[in-house]
Amino acid sequence: MTGPIVHVGAAITCTHGGPVTVVPGSPRVLVSGMPVATMVDQFLVAACIFQLPPPTPHPCIRVQWLTPATRVFANGAPVITQTSVGLGLAPDQAPQGPPIVAGVQPRVIAQ
């Protein structure tokens, strides 16, 4: 997927508004002074408010990316772009919906 490369400081949320923190596996490749996000990194969700009826908490706890960049790699792993497709996952691994990537660096584009 062609688009700007996602980095550690990017504004990512789960479908329900919980902020996503990127935990880089190997922060050697930088864009805008921050490590790029790759398929091997962890994407942890905090404070997701999603509930199932009756009010039973069922929050997103992590994001799993399905379609990273196909031609750009960092330390051997495909990078994540703003147009990459992913899923928020609950503790029981149930898919919760796609993450929202809002703010990324605009200068480096990957395909």
Image: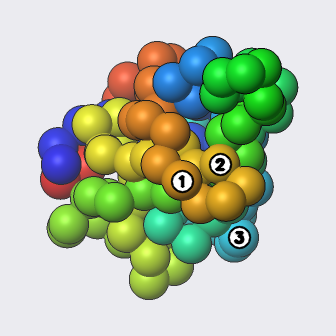
State if disc 2 and disc 3 touch (CB < 8 Å).
Answer: no
Residue in the picture at 51% in, 79% down? 75
Residue in the picture at 25% in, 49% down? 110
One can see residue 71 in this view: yes
Q: Residue furthest bottom?
A: 76
**Mark 3: secondary structure:** loop
**Mark 1: secondary structure:** loop
**Residue 79, quarter of the rendered image:** bottom left
Q: Amino acid at mark 1?
A: Ala
Residue in the picture at 31% in, 46% down? 85
Pointer 1 residue? 94
Pointer 2 residue? 90
Residue in the picture at 39% in, 48% down? 86
Q: Is residue 107 above or below residue 35?
A: above
Q: Amino acid at mark 2?
A: Ala
One can see residue 12 in this view: no
Mark 3 and mark 1: Cα distance apart in space: 25 Å
- Here the colouring is rainbow
Task: Residue 106: give x, y in percent of width and height.
Answer: 37, 24
Could you classify mark 2 by the number of other residues whose Cα lies within 10 Å: few (under 14), some (14-19), or many (20 or more)?
A: some
Could you classify mark 1 by the number of other residues whose Cα lies within 10 Å: few (under 14), some (14-19), or many (20 or more)?
A: few
State if disc 2 and disc 1 touch (CB < 8 Å).
Answer: yes
Disc number placed over residue 5 in the picture, else none: none
